[in-house]
Image (spheres, helix red, strand yellow):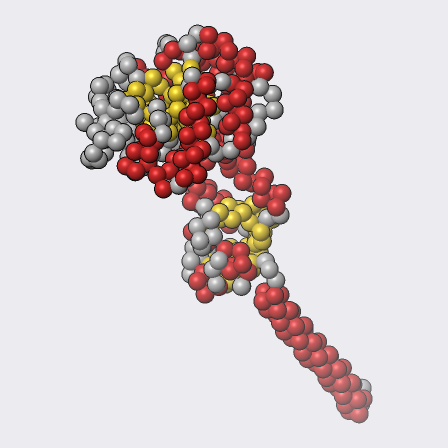
Amino acid sequence: MTGIAWTIAALCVVGVLLVIATWVAFGAAASGRDVLRLQQSLASLAETTHDWMWSTDEHGRLTSSNAGSHSLLGYVPEDLIGVEAYDLLDPASRTAWRARVGELSRRGRGWSDVTLHMRHRDGTAVDIECSATPIVGRDGRVIGFEGTARSLPADRALEASRARQRDRIERVLADQSIRIAFQPIVSLSTGAMVGVEALARFDAEPYQPPDVWMRDAADVGLSVSLELQALRAALDNIAILPAGLYVSINASPRTIADPAFLELLLSHETPLDRLVLEITEHELVPDYQPLTNTLGYARSLGLRLAVDDAGSGYASFRHILTLRPDYIKLDRDLTAGIDTDAARRALASAVVMFALELDAVVTAEGVETAGELDTLCSLSVDAAQGYYLARPSTDALEWAQWSGRRLRVVGREPRAASGFA
């Protein structure tokens, strides 16, 4: 090949290289613009989406968060940077979820549409749906996670809540952890302690009042099981009480109609004539026949009947008319402030007159002041219970000392310190 030929060939190669370089440079620029546009789109999405977009390091500490954290959990992004994501979970699920994330990290995997139970900044529970992918370092090791979270749809949130309720109730039933408190009931004519009411106490977490435990149990179909366990616990403690006191126990119409209820009463050593059964139901009973069948037989063996919460609604008065109880209990809503409210006094007086026709005893619940006590005495209410008289006690040694106790403040006598002499 001549020198001219070599020169022409070299120029062609250079030209091709220039074309390739130009194409690569153009492609790189285009790729850079694409990456920039993608980054801008992601930033815009993070600012406008209602989802919570987040990332963590390998220790679970949050390294980024968009504004979705505020609408979902009440935290602005700046509050969360450096916080362990596990601390946002419900305490009961933290250990298990930390172990699960550790296992996913070792396997280089994420998760999709997982329901997590978290805590809002104000302390309320929040169910979220969460998905995440691992962040992989240059050495191939997982160095964190990034993902999104959003509120659960209403139906799934209810399902998750019910599952947790059921789990809590089943743990209480399995552990048989219900404790019993007895609250004294005092005759207002003599000041003598005549009976006690058995009240369930729950130590399981999270702390909830007894009525919330019972309501949660009803929501998941376990109310009968929970009430029966509370009833058994009460019956098992009656032997510690002084013999002269009657014991008021609580049960809903659904539990009373269950065959296990009567079986428990009949199989226990406690004589039925020492028990007063309080019907605790604020809703209408559609069919009283199963209820009256059980109650009729039990009452023939000595069981006495009380209707709870009289004055709190129409349902309680319907129970009174249908069941003709031995005791009528005035609701705390009626006794609270009765000394300063003429309407409350009028209604309580009407209940007392009605009870006379039934030959029933009227007991006022929730007495908390001397004025309330004096007014109830003036209305000829038969008995009362409440913090002013005595608080519920779980102390078996105290129960055994209740025999013969009398109230210092009786009727319209000069007021003195409340409590038992």
Looking at the picture, tell me which residue is in the foreground, 268 or 7: 268
- Residue 287 in sight from this viewpoint: yes
Residue beneath the point at 54% across and 31% down: 314
Q: Residue furthest top?
A: 301
Residue beneath the point at 30% across and 38% down: 371
Q: Is 223 left or right of 39, judged from the image as shown? A: left
- Residue 110, image x and y in percent? 57, 50
Image quarter (top left, top right, bottom left or bottom right) of the N terminus: bottom right
Measured along the vertical axis of the image, is residue 286 above or below residue 85?
A: above
Residue beneath the point at 45% across and 13% down: 264
Total marks in image: 0
Measured along the vertical axis of the image, is residue 214 above or below residue 9?
A: above
Tell me the quarter of the picture where residue 385 sits: top left
Looking at the picture, tell me which residue is in the foreground, 268 or 111: 268
Q: Is 280 left or right of 13, judged from the image as shown? A: left
Measured along the vertical axis of the image, is residue 112 above or below residue 203?
A: below
Q: Is 113 left or right of 412, judged from the image as shown? A: right
- Residue 86, image x and y in percent? 45, 50
Residue beneath the point at 42% across and 58% down: 83
- Residue 56 in sight from this viewpoint: no
Image quarter (top left, top right, bottom left or bottom right) of the C terminus: top left
Tell me the quarter of the picture where residue 374 sits: top left
Looking at the picture, tell me which residue is in the foreground, 417 or 259: 417
- Residue 4, image x and y in percent? 80, 92
Looking at the picture, tell me which residue is in the foreground, 268 or 187: 187
- Residue 378, image x and y in percent? 32, 30
